Image: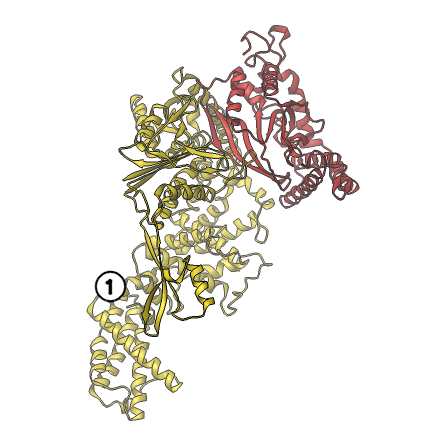
Chain colours: A yellow, B red
Amino acid sequence: MPDLLLELFSEEIPARMQRQAAENLKKLVTDALVNGGLVYEGAKAFVTPRRLALSIHGLPAKQPDLKEEKKGPRVGAPDGALQGFLKAAGLKSIADAKIQNDKKGDFYIAITEKKGRATQDVIAELIPSVVRSFPWPKSMRWGSGALTWVRPLHSIICTFGPETEEPEVVRFDIDGIQSGNVTRGHRVMSSGEITVRRLDDYAKKLEAARVVLDADRRKEIILADAKNIALAHGLELVEDEALLEEVAGLVEWPVVLLGEFEAAFLDIPPEVIRATIRINQKCFVLRDPKTGGLANRFILVANLEATDNGEAIKAGNARVIRARLSDAKFFWDTDRKTKLEGRLPKFGQITFHEKLGTQAARIGRIAKLAKELAPVAKADAAKAEKAATLAKADLLTEVVGEFPEVQGLMGKYYALAEGIDKEIAAACEDHYKPQGPNDRVPNAPVSIAVALADKLDTLAGFWAINEKPTGSKDPYALRRAALGVIRIVLDNKLRLPLLDGAFRKALAALPKMIEPKNVKDAPSISPEEDLLGFFGDRLKVYLRDAGARHDLVDAVFALGGQDDLVLIVRRVEALGKFLDTEDGKNLLAGYKRAANILSIEEKKDNKKYSGEPDAAKLSAPEEKALASAIKTAENEVEAALKSEDFEAAMRATAKLRAPVDAFFDKVIVNADDKAARENRLKLLNRIREATRHVADFSRIEG
Amino acid sequence: MSDKNDPLSPARSFQGLILALQNFWARQGCVILQPYDMEMGAGTFHPATTLRALGPKPWNVAYVQPSRRPKDGRYGENPNRLQHYYQYQVILKPSPPNLQELYLQSLAAIGIDNKIHDIRFAEDDWESPTLGAWGLGWECWCDGMEVSQFTYFQQVAGFECSPVSGELTYGLERLAMYVQGVENVYDLNFNGLEGDKRVTYGDVFLQPEKEYSRHNFEYADTVMLFEQFKMAENACKKYLADGDRGEEHLMALPAYDQCIKASHVFNLLDARGVISVTERQSYILRVRELAKACGAAWLKTEGGRA
């Protein structure tokens, strides 16, 4: 079975786009082949800074033949219809058509055999269209051409043939670039053209020309060499997967070197050193196991085996890192000369958002809210207020101006440096948390209060000015803020009624000129209720990711007035366990049956059957038993809910199962006696009501 | 390559480095222009780039452009930051297929040998909101230091560039510091001589840096500058209107001069801190409107037409 080798050789592809591009190339080409009836055995895509490559193994030499039947007019149809049919089917005369018979009589049918095309021809058509429509995040034109690619595209290899034979070049031309079997190696460490046949010699020849084709192998080489060099100097590599991935996309031939900077720079906080070296220089930092802190060394990854063993490269990189670190040190030293408190007035001149006022106003709101939330978090109210006031001050420091990703953390450093209370200092760092799904959730009381206040103010503000997330657009990261609140509340088991305890307070603190309006399309929904709905959706996503059933979350939310996240989750858990039991499953079935009958009858009679059934009119022993079981269960459920014991509430509800089953077994609801029928329908309604104390069973699937 | 002891060796003098680049690009067939005689923030503003990048005619040019960034002044106290510095600008239109090779050869011409130096092309998308221009390319790294900007222009003044120009911008001071091995820009040897004949970058530019930093941040006459902005804006619009002959335009270049002026005046006002965050955007938009209108006018001139 023949193999395909494709290489698209270009100028440097941005590192961040490489992996996705390789995946896209593989998917686009293999999907199109499979759609054309060309099933393959295996495919692998590769990417380096200058090339995207794809090898597809075990393709058939040609497409399967296809037989196509086209139904024509009846036998004896007018000539016009026949001629039309012949033309459409590509037949010369009606004698070439076959005659078939169906219920209505004889009709013509044209059977055309579509010969499968040679795979090579399919590829020759396919690749140009893939290149022309390739989904780069950004692409460009160059020279006088009209073709677009991520950067100028220089050459294309496309060979096809069986393993044992010399493969052929699949010929095509894309805007003057002719496919061939020639590529180039490393820009500096190789010269001339390389002629290739298929993947195995391609990869080998590239390797000889100082190109490691496989990005994962480049990563392995970098990681192993970096660790070895570190070890040889008694140091440890501070691993950084994202940086490793990026660096592997910046080199075709990784050469790992060790550089050095002055130990005096180690006074700078390690996170700042790391940020400087990582972001600006794409280098790794090293840890000294003896001190536990950073070492004054760094690992750089060059794309060159230099003739001077990398001395010039090391010196050059060290020079830039030295300059960067002196800037960082200067910033760090300068920043500590001004107290955080002293920076606050400047926030009065900085707009947070056109409609939401200045940063100063926002910080004021957060401080007030943090103070109000302090009891919920079991925090000292004065400390919470103070921490919220200072938490954003580091945004005005030089270090954070240079490296926004150390915001918060620097606040902590500066707060500690001026001797501010540790809990307040910690809140400066932690109030931004959790930032992503893997980020830590704050658990110190003061941090909790400020973190909640910060997020709630953001949510309330953007809700009030109607800047809610839509589809994939969430420019103010409001989904993340809501999820942050949810995680903080649940992780710390905080009892926070969202509507009254959080949303209304946050909305009330907003500038006076903003009047939070009700939802445009649903004027009866207040902004806080709308926000609660948003939290409900976030919670559903969160609980679903944690393995809970989303319909159970719906069933609990549908009860209305549910705004205590801890209770919602406990209720969902209890409900889930209950529905796993036989009693639960049967009761749900009984509920569905009752609800179905009710909805049919209510529709038929065009009236609602609500209210208490008349005890005097209950005749069958099963309906009497059910009526009394409902009363008992409701009393027990109510008591259990009062003490927030959802398991007990479920157990009490479960007691309805036997009487409900017996009722449906023995009692005919739609009795001839109208009064008995009405009374029984009311009884069914009582089943619906009784279960509604624990959840809206109508939302539960199954 | 020139002898290491020659005062005009790129490794010995700032001017030697400039001359080496001039020679290199002249040999590639570029027109070597002298700097444009107006204050501007970057070599891209030179009409030989902004306007010549528009329209179908081929154009190859190289020039040094003194660049003024009023906000970057540091009173001569920062070893790397200047409010006035030199950019070396190359435009090749259409961009040739071997542009990266040519760039590497130009580095070799100033003594940066790619057998021992790690030259890298790191993603950098370029955008100039004031010029309504954008392009894709890289910042070029030499041993971890950014030494040039490499851009394929896609749009200028809001118009598609067809053919595409390749733009190379070298930060001359930074490159010179690297090849001369000095840590402070003011220590650069300017003329390549030694002893009392030696002239440093500081001898030439330290006093101006101090004086202009004072001017840019503290004393520039803002009342006058606000007025000048309006005057330049109005003059630009007037020349655009007066020169418009329907299918043809007679004064695209004088109009564009006023756009350059407005842009620099805005930069000065910005450095003086008298433009608020919200106003800033509207000033940028006003300059962009001028640039777009000038680009449209240029396309109706001999230089901009087919």
Most extreme residue toward the bottom, as rendered? A673
- The quadrant in which residue B126 appears is top right
> Of A29 and A84, which appears nearest the observer?
A84
Q: Which residue lies under the disc numbered 1?
A: A577
Q: Please state if A666 lies on the left or on the right of B295 as rendered.
A: left
Q: Position of residue A202 (x, y in %)?
A: 34, 30
Residue A399: image location, x then y, percent: 50, 34
- Quadrant occupied by the C terminus of chain A: bottom left
Q: Is residue A243 above or below residue B245?
A: above
Q: Residue at x 30, y 76 (%)?
A: A690
Q: In the shown orientation, is residue A673 left or right of residue B194?
A: left
Residue drawn at 28 percent across, 61 percent down: A573
In this view, the residue in front, A298 or A646, is: A298
The local secondary structure at tag 1 comes to helix
Give residue B210's position: percent from left, percent from top: 66, 24
* Location of the N terminus of chain A (image quadrant): top left
Chain bearing mark 1: A
Determine the image quadrant of residue A405: top left
Give coordinates of residue A314: x percent, y percent. Answer: 42, 20
Q: Residue A250 versus residue A383: which sits nearer the camera?
A: A250
Q: Nearer the viewer, residue A208 or A303?
A: A208
The residue at the point 23 percent across, 90 percent down is A619
The amino acid marked with disc number 1 is Lys
| Number of marks in the rendered image | 1
**How many neighbours does mark 1 have within 10 angstroms: few (below 14), some (14-19), or many (20 or more)?**
few
Give the residue drawn at x 24%, y 73%. Answer: A587
Say whether residue A341 is visible: yes
Could you tell whether A528 is left or right of A586 in the image?
A: right
Residue A634, visible in the rendered structure: no
- On screen, residue A230 above or below A124: above
